[in-house]
Amino acid sequence: MAQQTPVAESLLYFYDRPKEPVFFPKGNNDVIFQIPEDYLSSRSKSIVNELPSRFERVKEEIQIRKIELPDLSEPMGLGKRENFSGFIPYHRKLAARVIEVLMGMRTTEDLRSAVAYCRENLNPLLFIYSLSVAMLHRPDTRNVNIPPLSETFPDKFIGGGLLNRAREEANIFQTDGTRVPLRLPLDYTASDVEEEHRVAYFREDLGINLHHWHWHLVYPFDGPDVVVRKDRRGELFYYMHEQIVARYNLERFCNKLGRVKRLQSLYEPIKEAYFPKLDSFVASRVWPPRNSNVTLSDVDREQEQLKFDIQDLERWRDRMFDAIHRGTVLQADGQEMQLTEAGGIDILGNMMEASTISVNQRYYGNLHNLGHVALALCHDPDNRHLETFGVMGDSATAMRDPVFYRWHAFVDDVFQEHKATLPPYTLQQLQFDNVNIAGFSVQTDGSKAANQLETTYDQNDVNLTRGMDFTPRGNVFARITHLNHKPFTYVINVNNKGTQRIGTVRIFMAPKFDERGITLLLRDQRLLFIELDRFTANLKSGNNTIQRKSTESSVTIPFEQTFRDLTTNRPTDSEGLSRFNYCGCGWPQHMLIPKGTPEGFPCELFVMISNFNDDEVDQAADAETCDDASSYCGIRNKKYPDKRAMGFPFDRPPRQGANTLADFRRNLPNMSVIDVKIRFTPPSNNPNIVD
Amino acid sequence: MAQQTPVAESLLYFYDRPKEPVFFPKGNNDVIFQIPEDYLSSRSKSIVNELPSRFERVKEEIQIRKIELPDLSEPMGLGKRENFSGFIPYHRKLAARVIEVLMGMRTTEDLRSAVAYCRENLNPLLFIYSLSVAMLHRPDTRNVNIPPLSETFPDKFIGGGLLNRAREEANIFQTDGTRVPLRLPLDYTASDVEEEHRVAYFREDLGINLHHWHWHLVYPFDGPDVVVRKDRRGELFYYMHEQIVARYNLERFCNKLGRVKRLQSLYEPIKEAYFPKLDSFVASRVWPPRNSNVTLSDVDREQEQLKFDIQDLERWRDRMFDAIHRGTVLQADGQEMQLTEAGGIDILGNMMEASTISVNQRYYGNLHNLGHVALALCHDPDNRHLETFGVMGDSATAMRDPVFYRWHAFVDDVFQEHKATLPPYTLQQLQFDNVNIAGFSVQTDGSKAANQLETTYDQNDVNLTRGMDFTPRGNVFARITHLNHKPFTYVINVNNKGTQRIGTVRIFMAPKFDERGITLLLRDQRLLFIELDRFTANLKSGNNTIQRKSTESSVTIPFEQTFRDLTTNRPTDSEGLSRFNYCGCGWPQHMLIPKGTPEGFPCELFVMISNFNDDEVDQAADAETCDDASSYCGIRNKKYPDKRAMGFPFDRPPRQGANTLADFRRNLPNMSVIDVKIRFTPPSNNPNIVD
């Protein structure tokens, strides 16, 4: 009992096996919480005293101090076995209440008492969500890294019956070294008879889904203002999802599929089916599938206090278009507000999402969220079959479903309607005088070919033990096959004819040809540009050579964040990785580059250096980090670090005459474009992969 | 180690927790099997030796003798986590091979060795099915009662997440007496918004589904001739399912629903959805639901070696109609065979089902089975989504689905087309000269009202522990709410004006009015008559009073067979119930009487006494029992005990002029009809029910 976990860090133990009682040992028999009797149900009380005889001696006992707690009866109204969705307004309100209570705790120890009470008495999904939002936002806990959701609820990420196999493995093989990693095949949700399955490796990627979940934790829909009202959150909502759609379209092109079709008509049958094959441990259910050719219906479900019509979605959409074409939105007080060139997109983003800072939710409604809900409930819109929602109803699972991209292609289309009302960027806005890019190339580590990006499938193991309630302890690994690329380096030669200055280097990539093999017009290509990096560079007078590694990307979080077992490795982190480098939100590094093709998928790699004087945001540079993936996630507790519109310079239709990318960069020597190929090595040529 | 379980009885231990390894302790640490090394996989071998340290000392060790086994590589081709269906020809062939091997074992001990090998190496569903068929049919094991499937695979019978709750309960509460029974609510698959849900208590009844599973065990589709070729099996296939449809229609009438609509057009959308909310432990999946308005598609799935078109089903149907209207069927050798008055229905039954004794499967196909399969796979007919089949694909679960009744209403309609070609029964065939029924009544025990049957909901507990793999031992009960009725007695006064004779008493019941409240014509009513009992009575000359209890019904098996925990109670069966009274197959006693209505559902109760000389079947009366439920199940290893057509006298359209039941019995004093009411007491008036 020598060890004493710091109070803030001890909160992590509440993430362990969320369906086991709070008073069961946590971790690998590391800790047991002594819970005040008043916090326990009568059945729990009846067995607490017999526990010492059932478990080996734990390393540490933590006394939970009893404090008086604010009323939590409302969130306790969500049954412990019900499903929970941040997209559902009623559930959001329950979570907002819990978040408010946890944010309001005076000391970390008080927080721990409140958390212990919540752990015993709340729905586990609601609990983990609310605790995570609170930990991310409280000054005393925000440097404690919460575990990836895939450790707490592996059932939301790893399907195909693997978790049942893992449970058997853990029960049958209990001696060290006798367990083997369980392979999760790449193709478990569908077969190649289904065209859409060709891009399942993207949709079902662990890191991508963790990113989406974490993004919505950083930007919750509801809660105290301090957690919801963030710099340019509406714009980031637009931009992050625009990039997801662009990235998805690139993957589609690589797999001989056309661009994803907007879910434009809400009354037409939806061709794409999806059978997620994921369990839901909490709801003791499976995530319901969606059959082919299902049509959306009006939703009226008492259980989740949901009642809206498909017509409502259309009405809100039309009102948003109305606001866009008028250039003003109607505020709740009846006043009009301009959709300005700089700020309009942020207003529209908040309105579309919609979060609590939407400008007039009564009028503009709740389009994006309730679209998710309508799609998630299309199999049982009036709850006659007592079914829970599908994967579209949970930010941790929604990106698995092909319809997610159809929905977000529609959402993005509304934003693009606004972008089309803005004046195109002028040469003046795009230039950086006296800065010429003299050379630009990209070099894959260890490769002879220039300007070739190289991808393949890799396998990595994820430890499931912390999410496997009521199973013998010890590591059980899922072996996951995922896309990856070899690290590479951008080399940019810059000739600065002026004095020493700072430039913002912006790197984007887009396909060169459309689905038909015809060169893309910039009008269309701009929507396919994916951001690869954005960083500042010191430009001394004269020639400069900028080298930038792919692993430094402002879009991604490190590979280790997805696949390293952070907690297990914590005490003996031999590689000197500081835990505090990881912030959770961010595109996974292994998915930075699209899959490509065996013959080499042709892309255009674009670089632009803009004047940092025009980009700089007024804020103190302090030690607060979590800026790993600022392009898609912002920086924690700070302003978005680039004053330009997100997606600049491709966020608006190009100026008159700039029909192609070549036209666009004409007379702009601070830009450069090169042809690159993405070459994919199939697993059959990769001896390390067994699938 | 004093105890030594007889070899045949020791086979029952192989039913225990079918996903745990064969070398894990069975029962409540009762037995451990010592398996020959050669029978084990290499991973199993690696841990067998460490087991003694993990489990408490067991009461008995059973050495499995190593014998040389026939080749089982083909059935081993079915993966251990795949689903298994007797309706799928490929799976049937695999099972037939295992059954053949097990039936062929020379001694019981050899059988045990083969079973141990199969338990370790075969798919658990295939294993349990094949073992059960073999045990039911081998002379050395047929008196050993196999446990109800609901104990071995509770996941096929008990849904709604209850088994996950049970697993938690067993893990958290490990001391005697701390566990509580877990309530399975009556309404967990749908809500009353769904009209079809009104009869879910029937479709999802534990006993009814066990009956259907057991019936198909007694009459397997494939296997050695000794298990398939049984007296009048084709006719019994027709009759048992005809009765199911009739019983379902009665329940529908009691719930203000019209008769079930035949699934006549195979290309129309199927309105009825079904979300079974059942897990599949073996396949680590949930049973897939069927959405509303799904249309059937051609099936082409490599995995189950299935390939047939909906057109094939239509073609086989049309050929059967063709045979019926010609009065002859085409045999495989090109010869014609008469559909005789007595034997035609048996030929058609085997043809329709279709079992291996179908007269010409190449020509008449596999209509009933593949209809089940097409319905079970309508969500993924080409396996593009890698989905397994729905509940319609398993005889243990099919009766839960509303579409089962639509399919069997169609199947029955084909049989009725044949029945309509037969000459109606003449007065001569129906009479029993000099036998007059002078009085007929029914009296519910403890009730003052005459001719009133009384129903309500009851609750009973089912012990789940034997099916809960990898869970701490000890009883875990599911508390199941089910329909029941008070026991009652028929009283029949018979005046025999002749000499002493034996009569066959036949008791049927049908609703008096149709969906619209209009008196039923016998033409329609005859299809709604449900058999309640059939027995022989000794009629002495003069007046006789026959009293017969509802619990003696020839249709049902005792209540205890469904709800008593036979195995646990075996050693201390204080109530003197012989285990050998239970044979598994049979309509559950608690479902003998339809639900009725609170105001009393009006029915006609019909009794007929026929001359046993015309009914008697030529066979020895020996000690072989299992005749509890001979009306729907036949008698084990014997001929069907009634020479008349099954369903007699209502199996054919009535004679000219007999428009009503009253017309029908005119001039037939050996028949009697009375009005009865079925009065249902709702749970709200029943203090014993908590739902």
Image (cartoon, coloured by chain):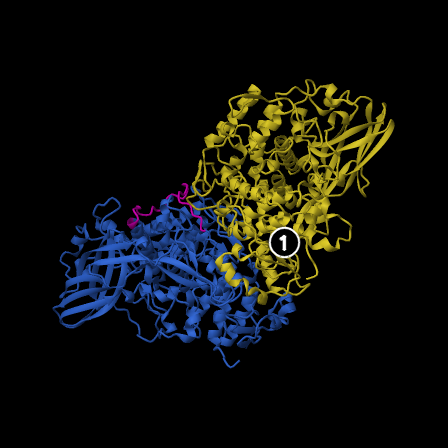
Chain colours: A yellow, B blue
Image quarter in which the C terminus of chain B is found: bottom left
The residue most toward the right is: A542
The magenta stretch spans which residues?
B253-276
The residue most toward the bottom is: B2
Categorize mark 1 by other alpha carbons within 10 Å: few (<14), some (14-19), many (20+): some
Label 1 SS: helix
Q: Which residue is mark 1?
A: A13
Q: Residue A671 at x, y = what percent? A: 77, 26
Residue at horizontal 46 percent and vertical 50 percent from the top: B376
Q: Residue A425 at x, y = what percent? A: 69, 21
B653 left or right, relative to A80:
left
Main secondary structure along the magenta-highlighted residues: loop
Residue at horizontal 62 percent and vertical 70 percent from the top: B48
Q: Residue B140 at x, y = what percent? A: 44, 75
- Out of B575 and B23, give the one closest to the viewer: B575
Q: Residue B310 at x, y = what percent? A: 44, 45
